[in-house]
Image (cartoon, rainbow, N blue to C red):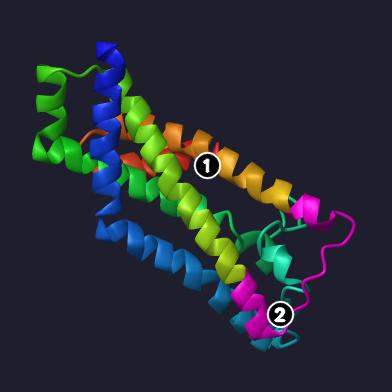
Amino acid sequence: MKKHNRLNSMLRVDFRRMLTSSMLYILCGASLVMPILILVMTSMVAGTTVVDPQTGTETTMEAFTSAWQIIGSSGGMMAMDMTAICNINLIFFMAGVYICLFIAEDFRSGYAKNLFAVRSKKRDYVVSKTLAGFTAGALMLICFFIGAVLGGAFAGLPFTLGAAGVFGLIMCMVAKIALMGVFAAIAVAVSCFARQRSWLSIIQERSGVAK
């Protein structure tokens, strides 16, 4: 019972810090604006031909054909077009950076050291930070989804769902949010290893995702 109360107390502190952090609202705002800019700007340059002055190779700029492509791209893993690069997966990097900075501040200020010395176990700390990071990442994903709806409307893109339908779209978002839990756990583990060196934790977290 005491262990349960200890974890609950730590969760309350972490969620209070998270909800009063200006960085969370900045990143949520960026997650909302990002798909709007991507969809509108790519629609404006769609069909434009760019010529490489050295090789003379012509490249036609491609854009999204549906607003939902920015949520779940149909391109392959090795595809390098707009739909494969500029999509909702960018949020995983943003959430990882947020978690790394969130934990680095604990070690930099001495809060984590005092926490472990007085009453708390590292396992409770990791669980609390993972849940807080997962919640922050899920909020960013939801903001991105809202931005995709607004961006698709502003760009005049169709909202066709294809064979997947509404159920497929919902399951895609559920899968993205569930995957955020895995990325949050990885980011927390790397951040705890790097401690106050936030730049090192960000590099290691990105290297781990790339592998």
Mark toward the viewer: 1 or 2: 1
Q: Which residue is pictured at 60% across the width and 83% down the height?
A: 41
Q: Is residue 96 left or right of residue 90?
A: left
Please state which of residues 59 and 71 is positioned toward the viewer in this rendering: 71
Residue 54 can be seen, yes or no: no
Answer above or below: position of 180 versus 46.
Answer: above
Q: Which mark is residue 180?
A: 1
Magenta stretch: includes residue 148: no
Q: Position of residue 108 (x, y in %)?
A: 13, 40
Q: Residue furthest top?
A: 1
Q: Which mark is residue 134?
A: none
User: Which portion, as a residue range, is magenta?
Assistant: 149-169
The answer to which image quadrant residue 121 occupies is: top left
Residue 87 can be seen, yes or no: yes
Q: Which residue is pictured at 85% across the width and 54% down the height?
A: 164
Q: Which mark is residue 61?
A: 2
The answer to which image quadrant residue 63 occupies is: bottom right
On-image quarter of the N terminus: top left
Please state which of residues 24 and 48 is positioned toward the viewer in this rendering: 24
Q: Which residue is pictured at 61% across the width and 61% down the height?
A: 87
Please state which of residues 200 and 114 is positioned toward the viewer in this rendering: 114
Q: Is residue 40 left or right of residue 32?
A: right
Q: Position of residue 13 (x, y in %)?
A: 23, 38
On-image quarter of the C terminus: top right
